[in-house]
Amino acid sequence: MSMFSIFNVTGSAISSQAQRLNVVASNLANADAVAGPDGKAYKARQVVFETVPMGSQAAQGVKVQNVFESDVPNRKVFQPQHPSADAQGYVTHSNVNPVEEMVNMISASRSYQNNVEVMNTAKNLLLKTLQMGQ
Amino acid sequence: MFEQFTQRLDNLSNGLVLRAQRQQVIASNIANADTPGFVARDFNFAQALQDANAGITHGTDPTATHNRHLRLTTSETGTGNQLAYTVQTQPSLDKNTVDMDRERANFTDNAIRYESTLRFINGHVKTMLSAIQGQ
């Protein structure tokens, strides 16, 4: 039943890439957010992938091991008239880098597509195997 | 007599099992294309097929330590611990050695070879059937 575990492997990869895409979406959505009343602005999040063995040595899936917050310092902009400005007149923005996030998004979506294609090929091969000897 | 009919079919089915296994290995490589530190795997298909046709099994074969122990044979054709590591083509910062272009090419190549093995099996079955029916 080795061909069937391809679905488990690519399925885990697809769901991990979807989670990465989700994190990118949340980062991009909060790219322009400023610090709230607690004085803490949004921190960009990143996912870390990890290999998971799936049954045999040949089947290696993926899972999201951890979602960590980037420790890049938040962007401070001098805007004394802004309602969220601190005592010195600085507004703390999120530390999201939109260019990095866009690149991350393209990479995640390409990996997602690759895995979908692998799944389709495996499905076609299995369907042809079903017709063996006919 | 009948073994001569099925010998070729046995060889083809060994090939089919190994193709399916290689497909799985390459699928794992593609799935782990973004995992830090992942090392891509593959195996020598020609060698594995030769071993399978010669009846050499790789993996955990239980050894009999007493002459009245029942013989356990692993019937499944397996690559066992023959899996090797692929050579890195371009170094990456996260120590991942998956080369997506190579994996995609291998995957397509392997899929076509799997399908052609299937067709050979189908053709063989048709030949045998017409030989049996004698029409």
Image (cartoon, coloured by chain):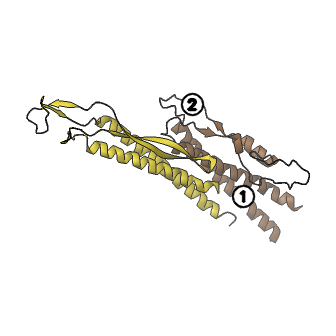
- 2 or 1: mark nearer the eye: 2
Query: Disc 2 designates what residue?
Result: B88
Quarter where residue B126 is shown = bottom right
- Look at label 1 and name its amino acid: Ile
- Left or right: residue A116 versus residue B16 is left
Chain holding disc 1: B
* Colour brown maps to chain: B
Report whether residue B134 is seen. Answer: no
**Numbered tag placed on residue B121 in the rendering:** 1
Chain holding disc 2: B
Decide: marks 2, 1 in contact (CB < 8 A)? no
- Left or right: residue B92 versus residue A33 is right
Q: In which quarter of the image is the N terminus of chain A?
A: bottom right
- Look at label 2 and name its amino acid: Gln
Q: Earlier in the sequence, mark 2 or mark 1?
A: 2
Q: Where is residue A31 in the image (x, y as percent from the top left)?
A: 25, 40
Alpha-carbon neighbours of circle 2 within 10 Å: few (<14), some, or many (≥20)?
some
**Circle 2 SS class:** loop
Rendered residue at 64%/64% (across/down): A131
- Left or right: residue A104 versus residue A34 is right
Kindly indicate whether the residues beneath marks 2 and 1 are on one polypeptide chain.
Answer: yes
Q: Is A134 rendered above or below residue A5?
A: below
Q: Position of residue A38 (x, y in %)?
A: 21, 41
Q: Position of residue A46 (x, y in %)?
A: 38, 40
**Circle 1 SS class:** helix
Report whether residue B122 is seen. Answer: yes
Between residue A32 and residue A6, name the one nearer to us. Answer: A32
What hue represents chain A?
A: yellow
Q: In which quarter of the image is the C terminus of chain A?
A: bottom right
Rendered residue at 66%/53% (across/down): B116
Quarter where residue A64 is shown = top left
Q: Where is residue B67 in the image (x, y as percent from the top left)?
A: 91, 51
